[in-house]
Image: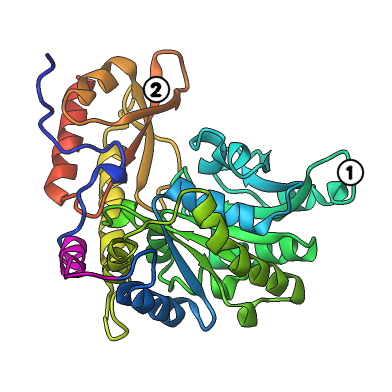
Amino acid sequence: MTEPRTLPPFASDNYAPAHPDVLAAVAAANDGYAVAYGDDPWTARLDARVREVFGAGALAFPVLNGTGANVVSLTALSPRWGGVVVSDVAHVNTDENGAPERVGGLKLLACPSVDGRITPDDVARWAGQRDDVHRAHPAVLSLTQSTELGTVYPLEELRTLTHVAHDLGMAVHVDGSRLANAAATLGCSLRDLTTDAGVDVVSLGAAKNGGMLGEAVLVLGPDAAPDAASGRAREAAAAAVPFLRKATMQLASKTRFVSAQLLALLGEPDDAEPLWHRNAARANAMAARLRAGLEALAGSDGDGVRVTRPTEANAVFATLPRPAADRLRAVARFYDWADGETPDRVEVRLMCAWDTAPGTVDAFVAAAADALT
């Protein structure tokens, strides 16, 4: 039997507990009877709050998990013969067991990425296949914000990507499981990153940012669409999502408990800093602190820690000797990501969460120093 680890995990922000305010909101929703399947006061308030945050006409459809949100979103935006352009490291491509393809019947069209991001040229290269009956029809561009490698798409870059996609007749989806972290990094609103950037449908994350269970599919307002094609895509998605949510087993009978969590995270209109932002900013700050601590362990002979990727949200990627990684793993759980620069080194991913404490980060860095010796 292995000894218990002495520090909280850095394996995933999914490991973190639910925020007390989220739990309190769920407890408050557990008040008597309420109509099932979303026809309840909490979901009605969520609809109103989503319109305040994301713009007039935006629609919220609570679902049970992130994979479900992505499958419902992409299926609603694509015809049966459609394809979805994604990054090669996108969660929908690598970590959802082919759910968009198995359940949604879609073809994922993966593009090689740099630090998790794809470029306008990566999107434009699919233009020649739009009228080829022998190929999957590129119908949707799906972006992850923040990316699986802990980077973010800056606002101007995001706007350019959506513009290129719309010019090609493609709808734009954002996998926003860590959308809050990206917004906190960029110092912008959730609307800036979605509606105002030309995004059509969002998988809005909650579980990685203090939620307990559940996410949401957001169809952004047709009136705010950047062009007629985008408006049509949003209208079609708004009509399709209610049926797809049920058909893909993502409609919770007691939807009020999912809606209550999302309401707690989105906060009230007069909140100076809503919970989603407080949680994400804390996680991002701890990742920056962790990166700084690990960079100090680089060493002069190249045998220390090497931070390998930009730290723009709540993830730190680094390589270190495999024996040191194994010793460090006995202190706090984390995942190997890839092979290192040489066979005796490994790249690891370290995730910070809304409740990661400065003392935990500092203790992990100290343990890493010990592991290297």
Q: Position of residue 82 (x, y in %)?
A: 74, 48
Tag 1 secondary structure: loop
Q: Is residue 145 above or below residue 113?
A: below
Q: Residue at x 52, y 76 (%)?
A: 58
Question: In this figure, which residue is indicated by the disc labeled 2?
Answer: 346
Residue 306 percent across, percent down from the top left: 38, 32
Q: Earlier in the sequence, mark 2 or mark 1?
A: 1
Quadrant containing the C terminus in the rendered view? top left
Res. 239 image quadrant: bottom right
Q: Do tag 2 and tag 1 residues touch (Cβ < 8 Å)?
A: no
For this view, does 89 lie left or right of residue 131?
Answer: left
Please give the name of the residue rendered at 28% of the width and 86% of the height, measured from the top-left corner: 270
Along the viewing direction, whichever of 311 and 130 lies nearer the viewer: 130
Residue 144 visible here = no
Query: Which three-letter amino acid code belongs to the residue tagged 2?
Result: Val
* Residue under label 1: 133
Look at the image and give the residue range highlighted in magenta.
21-34
